[in-house]
Image (cartoon, rainbow, N blue to C red):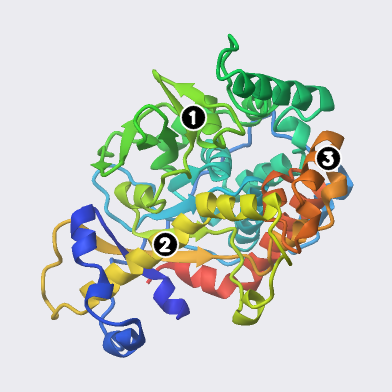
Amino acid sequence: MEDEEQFVLEAHDDALAETLDAEHLFSVGGESRRIEGSQQMRAGDPQALELPAYHARPHTLHVDRHVRKLWHDSDLDAGRARIPAMEGGKPGNREQRIALALTGGGARGAYQAGVLAGIADRAGGDACFPIITGVSAGAINAATLASHRGDLVAATQQLREAWLNLRIERVFRSSVGSLSSSLLRWSSKLLSGGAMPFQLRGLLDTAPLREYLTNLIDFSGIDDNIRAGRLRALALSMTGYATGCTVTFVHGDREISDWERAHRMSVRACIGVEHVMASAALPMVFPAIQVGEEYFGDGSIRHAAPLAPAVHLGADRIVAISVRYGLSEAERAVPQVSGYPPPAQILGMMMHGVFLDALENDAERLVRINRTLSLLPPGTKHPEGLRPVQILLLRPSEDLGKLSAGLVHTLPRALRILARGLGATGTTTPDFLSYLLFEPPYTERLMEIGFNDARAQWDRIESFLAGP
C-alpha cells in the first residue's frame, strides 16, 4: 500500500472530481486486483541543476551550544545523496516541479521542522522545494523556509533554531494577570448579554508571536528567491470570516494563474507577517487578523483540500508532512480515557478535526481519482483538468499527543491550572495539550523524532525526490 500512497491525481474541477470518485466504480475489497499491473502515468525526469551559493541573513537566531549539539552530532557531510534539484518554475519551463505541503497542528509543527532537518541532513544543499504551501502552524514553517536566502541546509537550520528558541510566552501572553483579565472580559460580555461596550478579540493575546515572527522572518527574501529561480511560489491559506471562504494568498512569479473553486480561491499578494498570523489564528482562542478589508482566521477551519494549492501552482510531486500518528488496530482498541470524557479529551478530538483530518482525506480522494484514471483504456485522453501528481505523505513514528502526557508541569502557572481544570491529566493522550505545548521539553523531542523519522525513511524519500 505504500506505493499506492505516493501517486495521486488532483481534479481541478470539483464536480468532475466527484463524478470520477473511484468509490462509485469499484469496491475497496476489489481495488487492488483491478489496478494491479496498471500503467502509471508519469511526467518526464527532472533535470539536475547546479544551485548558486547564498549566504544566510545576519539576524538568523542562535541557540546555546549544548542545544545545537543535538543537530550536529549526526554525520552532516557523510553519506549525503546528490538529489536532482527541482526546477523552480521559470517561465515556459514544464520540467517536474516538487512542492512541500505543511499543514497545521500548533506545537506539533516542531515535528515538521525535524523532518525537514533530516531531509536536508541527507540531501544537502542540492535539494529544494520551489513550491511551498502552508496553513496554520505550517504557514510559519513555510514562510520561514521560503524567505531564507540560503540552501535547504541553512534554511532548515534557521527553522530548527526558531523552534528551539520558542516558548509559550513568545506565542501568547500567559501570565496569571493576562489570562485572568481576558477571562473576566469574556465573562462580563457574555453574562451581560453583549451589553458591555467593548469587543471580544480572542481569548489569548498573540502580540508576542507577531514580534517573534517579525524578528525571525525577512519576507523580502521571498522575492529574492523567486528572482533567483529557486522558488516558484509561497502559498498560505486562511479562512475569511466575512465570506466563509478559504483564501490562499500566493506570493509567486508572474506566470502563476489565479483559481477559484467552491468555497476556496486564490489571491495574489506580497506575503508578510499579517498573512502568517492570520493563517495561524486559532478561532476564538487567538484574535482574528485583518488582511486588506477582511478579517481572517486559521486556514485549517474549512480547508477541505489542503493539497490543492500545490497542484494549482503546478506541482507534479508533493511532499506532505502530517503530524498525525497512524494507530495500529491494537492501539485503537485501548481506550484513552475511562468513564465520562473530560473537556480536554473532547477539545483534543475537535482540534484533530480542524488540523489533521483534511490532509489525509484529501490524499485519499486524490488516490481514488488516480485509480479511476488508471482504469481508462490505454491511449484514452484524460478528462480536462486532470493530470498526474505524485504525493509522499510522511507520518510520525510515535504518537505526538501521548508524548505530551506528563508535561503539564512545564506550562506557565496559569495554563497549568487551566489544563488540569480541563482534565488534561485524566487521559493517556492529552491531544489538546499537545497543540499548546510550545515548550522545549516537548518541541525538542518532536524535532528529534522528526529528524530520526526522516533518516529512517531516507531510501523512500530519496527515491521520491529523485523522481521517476
Mark 3, residue position: 417
The single residue placed furthest to the top in the displayed view is 197
**In the rendered image, which residue does mark 2 sit on?**
361
> Of label 2 and label 3, which has the lower sequence position?
2
The three-letter amino acid code for the residue at tag 1 is: His
**SS under mark 1:** helix
* Distance from Cα at disc 3 to Cα at disc 1: 32 Å
Q: Nearer the viewer, mark 2 or mark 1?
A: 2
State the residue at coordinates (58%, 50%): 351
Between label 3 and label 1, give the one nearer the viewer.
Answer: 3
Compared with residue 56, is residue 365 higher up or lower down, i.e. above or below? below
Amino acid type, residue under disc 3 in the picture? Ile
Alpha carbon separation for disc pair 2 and 3 = 35 Å
- Label 2: which secondary element: helix
Task: Where is residue 6? Give x, y as percent.
Answer: 42, 71
- Residue at the spot of label 1: 275
- Nearest to the observer: residue 320 or residue 405: 405
Q: Residues within 10 Å of mark 3 (few under 14, many from 20)?
A: some
Q: Is residue 50 left or right of residue 436?
A: left
First in sequence: mark 3 vs mark 1: 1
